[in-house]
Amino acid sequence: MLAIEARDVTKTYGEGRLAVPVLRGVSLSVARGEVVALEGPSGSGKTTLLCILGCLLTPSSGRIAIDGQDVDPHRADRLWKVRRRSIGFVFQQFNLFPSLTATENVQYTLNLRGWRGRKATREADRVLDQVGLGHRKDFRPRDLSGGQKQRVAVARALAGSAPLILADEPTGNLDSEAGAQVLDLFRSLAKVENRGLMIVTHDPSVRSIADRVISIRDGQLTTGEAN
Amino acid sequence: MVDLALKMILDDKTRFAITVLGVGFAVALVLTQVGLFFGLLDNASVTIDRLDADLWVTARNTPNVDFANPFPESYVQRVRSVPGVTRADNLIVWYAIVSLPSGAKEQVVYYGLENFPLWNFPWDVASGDPSDLRRGRYVMLDESAERRFGAFEAGDYREFLGRRLKIIGKTRGARSFTTSPIAFVDYGLAQALAPDELEGRTTFVIVKLDPNADPIAVAAEIRRRLPYNDVYTKADWASASQHYWIESTGLGLTIFLTVFLGALVGVVIVAQTLYASVAEHLSEFGTVKALGGRNLDVYGIIAEQATFAAALGYGVGFLFAQALGPVLEQLDMRMIITPTVYVMVFVGTLALCLAASALSFRKVASLDPAIVFRG
Ligand SMILES: Nc1ncnc2c1ncn2[C@@H]1O[C@H](COP(=O)(O)OP(=O)(O)OP(=O)(O)O)[C@@H](O)[C@H]1O
Ligand SMILES: [Mg+2]
C-alpha cells in the first residue's frame, strides 16, 4: 500500500512576469513502512514539495493520492480533513506548544484527530514510551533538550495512526549525536508502525537510514535509486 | 481534552491579569454608574411607589411629585363619587423652610394627610406613631435629614416656617430627588403652614380603587369630571416623576455616555491585549492549522480566552461594585442594581469581549499553515 503517490505535480509561485516556477512535474511515491530521504540544494523546491504532499499548499497542477485515496488539492476548505486524518508532521523548529507538557502536546493533536478521554491518554503514553520519554511526560518543552523536544514531535506525528509522516530538516536544530538518535528512532518506528516516512534534509547522515534517496534540482527529480 | 486556550492564558498570567483588570474596571464603572442612576431615580418616585394609592390626581401639568401645584380641596368629593373608587383623600406635598438650632435654614418637603395609616404611609417607621400626627403640632422626620439638620430626637422642637413643631418620631427611606429631607405632618397643619397658597386647597388627590375596577376606565371618568386636572395611574405617575428628572438634568445622556465609555474602554483593552497575544502566538496557531485544525478551531481558542477574560473581569467588577455599595451608603448615595441589570451587564460584557476577540479572527483566518515550514 502506498502511503502517498504524487503524479506530475507542478507549482508556480506568483503570476505573469513575476511567476516563479518551483516544481516542474514531480512524480514520486512512498510506501507504508518505507523511509525516503529527499535531498537537494537550497531553493530547489524541497519544502514546497513537502507542503504540497502534506496538503498545506495547493499545487498548480498534478494529482495526489494519500493511502490510496485521491485528494482534491483544490478543495482548500477540505484539506484540513486530510491533514487531520492522514498526515503527521515533524518540523525543524519542533513547533511544540510551549504551554503544554509533553503528554499534552501529543494529546492535543489526538484531540484534533478525534481521539478523546482515556483513549487519547493511553495513546499519548504509548507513543511517548516508544520515543523513550516515558519519564519526561509532564515536562514542558522549555525543560527538555533539543533532542528530547524533537522526540516529542516524533511522538506527536506518530500518535493516532496517520499513514504518512513528513519531516522537514528534523535534525537541523540538533547536534549530530542527538540527530542520529532521532533518525534511528524515526526509522525503527516507521518500520514497526508501518508508516510511510519522508524526510527532507541537507544532512548526509539521513542517507544511511533511508530505504531510498530522491534528489531534486531546479524543481525536478534527478534520481530515485534504492539505497 | 487538552484545553490549549486556558494553558496559553496560564502561561502568560501577567498579560491576562491586565486584560481581566481592564474588563473589571469597565464592569465596575458601568455597574456603579447604572446603580447610582437607579438609586437616584428611585428617590424621585419612592413616595409614589410606597404610598398605597392606585391613582393620583394632580393639578394640570404638574411635572413631578416634588413640584406640586394647588387646586381646590373640594374636588376630592367629585372623585369619591366616581364608581370604582373605594377611597379618595387629599394629599399635600409642599416645601417648608426649617430653622435649625445652629441658626442655619434648610428646606424640607412635607407630606400632609388626614389619615396616614390608611395609606400605609410613611412605610418604614423607626420610632413614633404616624396616627399621632393629627393630635397636634407634630411632625415626623426622615432619618436621612440628620445629614442636613444634625442629630435630632423625638421630643425635640424645630421651627417650620416660623412655627414650632414637635418631632414625634423618625422614618426611614423617605427621600426626594431634590435631596430635601422629607417630613410628615397632619393635613390641617400642612395647610396652616402655608395659608396663602394652601387655604382650602390641596396638591393631590390620591385614590384607592375597588379591586375589580379598571384603573384606566376610572381614570378616564375622573378626567371627565375634573377637566382641569391630570390623572395618572401609580406606575405612570412614578415614571413621569422619574422622566422629569432624567430629562431636565441630562442624567439620561450622562449615564448613556458613561456606559458607552466604560464599554469602549473595556473593548479596546480586550481587543488590544488579545490581538497582541494572538500575534505573539501566531506560529502556534499555524501549527494548530497544520495539524488539521480548522479556522473554527483557532477561533474557538481565541473566543474561549475572551470568555475567560469576560467572566473573570465581570467577577472583579461585581465584587468592586459590591464593596463600593456600603461606602456610598455612608455618603448617603444609594446604588440600586437589580438582577436584570447584573444579567444584562454580564451578557453585554461577554458579547463585547467576543466582539473584541473577533478582531483577531481576521489575523488567524488569513494565516497560512505552511508558515510552520518557513523559519
Ligand atoms: N511563498 C512563496 N512565494 C514565492 N516564491 C516562493 C515562495 N515560497 C518559496 N518560494 C521560492 O520557491 C523556491 C523553492 O523554495 P523552497 O522553500 O521549496 O526551497 P527548499 O528546497 O526548501 O530550500 P531550503 O533547502 O533552503 O529550505 C525558492 O526559490 C523560493 O524563493
Ligand atoms: Mg526548505
Image: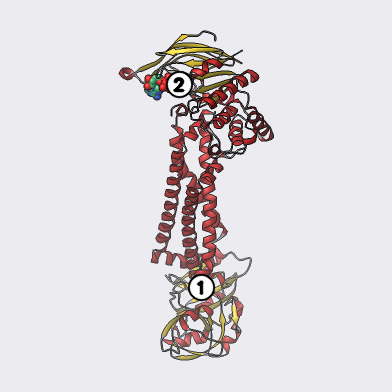
**Where B164 sits versus A80, above or below?**
below
Which residue matches tag 2?
A47
**Where B232 sits versus B261, above or below?**
below
Kind of element beneath mark 1: helix
Check mark 2 vs ligand 1: CB closer than 8 Å? yes or no. yes
Q: Residue furthest left?
A: A17
Q: Quadrant of the N terminus of chain A?
A: top right
Discs 2, 1: same chain: no
In x, y percent, where is residue A113? Answer: 60, 29
Q: Is residue B132 left or right of residue A168?
A: right
Residue B135's quadrant in the figure? Answer: bottom right
Which residue matches tag 1?
B330
Identify the residue shown where x is 43% and y is 64%. B246
In x, y percent, where is residue B352? Answer: 47, 48
Circle 2 residues within 10 Å: few <14, some 14–19, many ≥20: many
In x, y percent, where is residue A181? Answer: 57, 25
Viewer-nearest residue: B333 or A41? A41
* Mark carried by residue A101: none
If the picture is divided into quarters, which one holds ligand 2? top left
**Where A88 sits versus B331, above or below?**
above
